[in-house]
C-alpha cells in the first residue's frame, strides 16, 4: 500500500510537468525559414530556441513568381491569421503576396497567386503520414507534421514576422 501511495504522489508531481512542457517555450517574436536546409526556426530576442524540419512546394528552388508554379515564396512576410478549420491539420496564413510581389507579377502579366500557409498534413485518411516525411509535397506552402503544427500553433501569435530565405 505504501508503494502505491508513493507512486500516486509521484504521478501527481510529474503530470503537471509533462502537460506544461509546451508552456516552458516562449512565444516567438520571429520565424525564419531556410528553404535550402528544409528548416524553420522559432526566434525570441534574436536567439533560436526551437527548430522544425519542413516540407515545401513541389518546386522549392526560387521565389514564387506566379500562381500555380508550386514554389514557396521568399522574402519578409507576416503570419496574419490562423485557420483551425483548414483542409489540413491547422494552418497559419502568410500574407503573401507583398506589394513587391504584386508589382513583379503585374510586370510579368501573371497572377502572383496566394493562399500560402504553414500547415500540417491533409485531414483525410487517404495517405499515411509517412508518405509526407522528408519530401516536398505542397503547392507552395510550408508543411509540418500534425504534432509539430499543433505545437507551432501555440508558440506563434498572429502578427509574427516571418522571413523565408532561399
Image: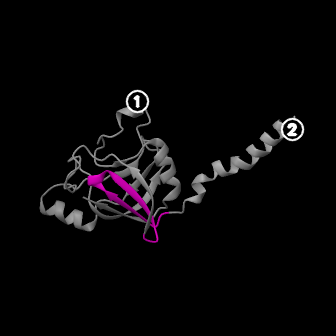
Question: Residue 8's quadrant in the figure?
Answer: top right
| Residue 124 drawn at (x, y percent) | 43, 32
List the single residue furthest toward the bottom. Answer: 45
Q: Earlier in the sequence, mark 1 or mark 2?
A: 2
Q: Secondary structure at mark 2?
A: helix
Comparing labels 1 and 2, the label whose residue is closer to the camera = 2
Q: Residues within 10 Å of mark 1 (few under 14, many from 20)?
A: few
| Residue 29 drawn at (x, y percent) | 46, 67
Image quadrant in which the N terminus is located: top right
- In this view, 30 is above or below 35: below
| Residue 150 drawn at (x, y percent) | 50, 47
Q: Which residue is mark 2?
A: 2
Q: Residue at x 57, y 54 (%)?
A: 22
Task: Please tell me which residue lies in front, 139 or 67.
Answer: 139
Q: Residue at x 13, y 63 (%)?
A: 107
CA separation, marks 1 and 2? 46 Å
Span colored in magenta = 28-46
Q: Which residue is mark 1?
A: 128
Residue 129 located within the stretch drawn in magenta: no
Q: Residue at x 69, y 46 (%)?
A: 15
Image quadrant in which the C terminus is located: bottom left
Question: Residue 100's quadrant in the figure?
Answer: bottom left
Q: Secondary structure at mark 1?
A: loop
Q: Residue at x 39, y 28 (%)?
A: 126
| Residue 56 drawn at (x, y percent) | 30, 47
Q: Is residue 147 left or right of residue 63?
A: right
Task: Please tell me which residue lies in front, 62 or 97.
Answer: 62
Q: How many marks?
A: 2
Amino acid at each position: 500500500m505504501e508503494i502505491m501511495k508513493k507512486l500516486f504522489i509521484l504521478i501527481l508531481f510529474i503530470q503537471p510537468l509533462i502537460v506544461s512542457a509546451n508552456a516552458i517555450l516562449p512565444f516567438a517574436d520571429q520565424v525564419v525559414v531556410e528553404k535550402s536546409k528544409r528548416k524553420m526556426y522559432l526566434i525570441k530576442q534574436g536567439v533560436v530556441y526551437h527548430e522544425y524540419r519542413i516540407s515545401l512546394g513541389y518546386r522549392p528552388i526560387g521565389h514564387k513568381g506566379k500562381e500555380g508554379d508550386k514554389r514557396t515564396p521568399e522574402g519578409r512576410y507576416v503570419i496574419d491569421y490562423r485557420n483551425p478549420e483548414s483542409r489540413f491539420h491547422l494552418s497559419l496564413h502568410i500574407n503573401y503576396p507583398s506589394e513587391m510581389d504584386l508589382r513583379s507579377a503585374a510586370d510579368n502579366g501573371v497572377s502572383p497567386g496566394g493562399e500560402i500557409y504553414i500547415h500540417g498534413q491533409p485531414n483525410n485518411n487517404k495517405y499515411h503520414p509517412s508518405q509526407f516525411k522528408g519530401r516536398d509535397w505542397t503547392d507552395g506552402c510550408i508543411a509540418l507534421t500534425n504534432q509539430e503544427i499543433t505545437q507551432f500553433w501555440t508558440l506563434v501569435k498572429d502578427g509574427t514576422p516571418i522571413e523565408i530565405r532561399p
